[in-house]
Image (spheres, rainbow, N blue to C red):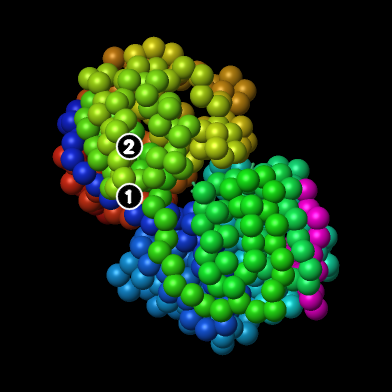
């Protein structure tokens, strides 16, 4: 695995673009197999998670092509309904393929995706909803096996507003018989993006972005063309990277209407936010003020995918912040390497109490998960001296050449083979 060498203490300034959203393009690729003919997705990020999803789809017989920022995909020749084991293990959120493959081919098998660095990642909410829609679901040698002649509409109330389960049900219901109502649905912007994409394919979905999504099953859907929305998590990561160095950044394409909780937190930390038509500007003070109490919540609350990055920035701020993680049960792995860099963080149950220190110092640290890895890069930018971040392949899952983007803002960051 490659490592980053980062020399800290340099102010980041300038403009950078937010790439297409990882957590939008993945469900859009899954939904595209519901359509007859080809779909074309533009503004796609070159991420290892995207390549993993394309690998899973190609293994079923889908034809895919990824050139530049454009993905063409056609599922007309899809025949295999066993999802690729190793790639499913790599890409746990691929569980939302169950709905579209089952709806379009009448059966689907996949290994249980299993847990990962941030939690157990169960799939009970997904399976319970598909059962309600008429799927026969069993387990054979560690595989989830689903069959359904024809799914039918159902009234589904989610016990938790699961993003993936909401997306899975929307895709399963799009060609089911009758109407499906999802209550306590997740409200993330990527779910609204999925609704709009599928409606352009000929689906009849409304309510995405609210807690109640209604899907009227249609006979068939057709492939279509779509431009993927910008990545709000990458945008937030870039703002924090500049802010922790006392710098100033303009993130082209970032959409403030999808980032209100995060931007409000940035203002509490003393960052001046400038919302424009074509992006978001952020100008930081010399030193960030503490964020105070921050709790991750389902959208529109503070996003769990920016929790580790905020934690790292608060480690080098003035004052005490308490960051509570309410979405995943194990998303504080980054505390240990941050402490190696001099951070003063105490874990109390689901909350990390961060006492900002004068200066972090460089160290050799290791990324344990995607957003924790991004957090270590942020800490290294603020730290005195050089930091080596190992295992950065995890960062490539959600950021397209992060070193190139940050060096373009004045960072001093190199990528080398694990030495
Ligand atoms: C999506 O994951 C995102 N991934 C995650 O981003 C994000 O952190 C998460 O939503 C929450 O916003 C994609 O969109 C590809 P959930 P997902 O189902 O769908 C529990 C990143 O860093 N749960 O909303 O897997 C689950 O264990 C990634 O980009 C069940 O208990 O998240 C978790 O505690 C990380 N049973 C909580 O719900 C289920 O059947 C939220 O999970 C499903 C989920």
Relative to 103, is 97 on the left or the right?
left
Is ligand 1 within 8 Å of the beta carbon of the residue shown at mark 2? no
> Which residue is denoted by mark 1 in the rendering?
253
Look at the numbered disc 1 and give the secondary structure of its residue: loop
Residue depicted at 18% across the width and 36% down the height: 13
Quick one: 387 or 318, which is closer to the camera?
318
Residue 71 position within the rendered picture, expressed as x and y whole percent measured from the top left: 40, 72
Residue depicted at 23% across the width and 26% down the height: 246
Quick one: 235 or 329, which is closer to the camera?
235
Place residue 300 in its image quadrant: top right
Q: Is residue 156 magenta?
A: yes
Residue 349 position within the rendered picture, expressed as x and y whole percent measured from the top left: 62, 23
Residue 120 position within the rendered picture, expressed as x and y whole percent measured from the top left: 65, 45
- Judge depth for marks 2 and 1 and give the one in front: 2
Quick one: 79 or 229, which is closer to the camera?
229
Residue 180 position within the rendered picture, expressed as x and y whole percent measured from the top left: 76, 60
Residue depicted at 40% across the width and 40% down the height: 256
> Which residue is denoted by mark 2 in the rendering?
275
In the rendered image, is residue 134 in sight? yes
Place residue 287 in its image quadrant: top left
Which numbered disc, 2 or 1, marks the residue that appears first in the sequence? 1
Q: Residues within 10 Å of mark 1 (few under 14, many from 20)?
A: many
In the rendered image, is residue 115 in sight? no
Mark-to-mark CA distance, 2 and 1: 11 Å
Q: What stretch is highlighted in magenta?
A: 141-157
Query: Is 396 drawn above or below residue 336 in the view shown?
Result: below
């Amino acid at each position: 695995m490659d490592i980053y060498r980062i020399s800290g203490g340099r102010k980041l300034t300038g403009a950078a673009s937010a790439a297409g959203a990882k957590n939008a393009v993945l469900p859009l690729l899954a939904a595209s197999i519901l359509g007859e003919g080809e779909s074309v997705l533009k503004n796609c990020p070159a991420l290892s998670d995207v390549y993993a999803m394309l690998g899973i789809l190609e293994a079923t017989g889908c034809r895919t092509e990824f050139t530049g920022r454009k993905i063409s995909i056609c599922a007309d020749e899809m025949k295999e309904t066993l999802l690729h084991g190793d790639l499913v293990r790599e890409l746990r959120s691929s569980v939302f393929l169950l709905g579209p493959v089952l709806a379009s081919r009448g059966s689907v098998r996949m290994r249980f995706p299993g847990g990962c660095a941030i939690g157990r990642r169960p799939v009970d909410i997904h399976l319970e909803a598909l059962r309600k829609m008429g799927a026969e679901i069993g387990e054979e040698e560690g595989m989830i096996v689903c069959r359904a002649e024809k799914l039918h509409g159902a009234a589904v109330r989610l016990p938790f507003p699961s993003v993936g389960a909401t997306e899975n049900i929307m895709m399963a219901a799009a060609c089911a018989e009758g109407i499906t109502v999802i209550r306590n649905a997740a409200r993330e912007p990527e779910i609204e993006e999925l609704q709009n994409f599928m409606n352009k394919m000929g689906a009849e979905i409304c309510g995405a972005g609210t807690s109640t999504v209604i899907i009227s099953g249609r006979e068939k859907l057709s492939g279509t063309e779509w431009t993927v929305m910008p990545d709000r998590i990458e945008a937030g990561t870039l703002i924090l990277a500049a802010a922790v160095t006392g710098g100033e950044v303009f993130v082209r394409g970032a959409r403030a209407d999808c980032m209100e909780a995060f931007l409000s937190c940035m203002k509490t930390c003393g960052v001046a936010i400038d919302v424009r038509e074509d992006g978001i500007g952020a100008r930081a003070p010399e030193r960030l003020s503490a964020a105070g109490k921050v709790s991750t919540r389902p959208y529109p609350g503070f996003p769990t995918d920016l929790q580790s990055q905020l934690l790292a920035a608060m480690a080098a701020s003035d004052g005490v912040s308490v960051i509570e993680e309410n979405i995943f049960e194990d998303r504080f792995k980054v505390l240990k390497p941050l402490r190696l860099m001099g951070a003063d963080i105490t874990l109390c149950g689901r909350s990390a109490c961060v006492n900002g220190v004068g200066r972090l110092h460089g160290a050799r640290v290791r990324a344990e998960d995607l957003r924790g890895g991004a957090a270590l890069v942020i800490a290294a930018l603020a730290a005195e001296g050089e930091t080596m971040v190992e295992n950065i392949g995890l960062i490539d899952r959600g950021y397209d050449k992060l070193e190139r983007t940050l060096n373009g803002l004045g960072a001093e960051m190199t990528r080398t083979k694990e030495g």
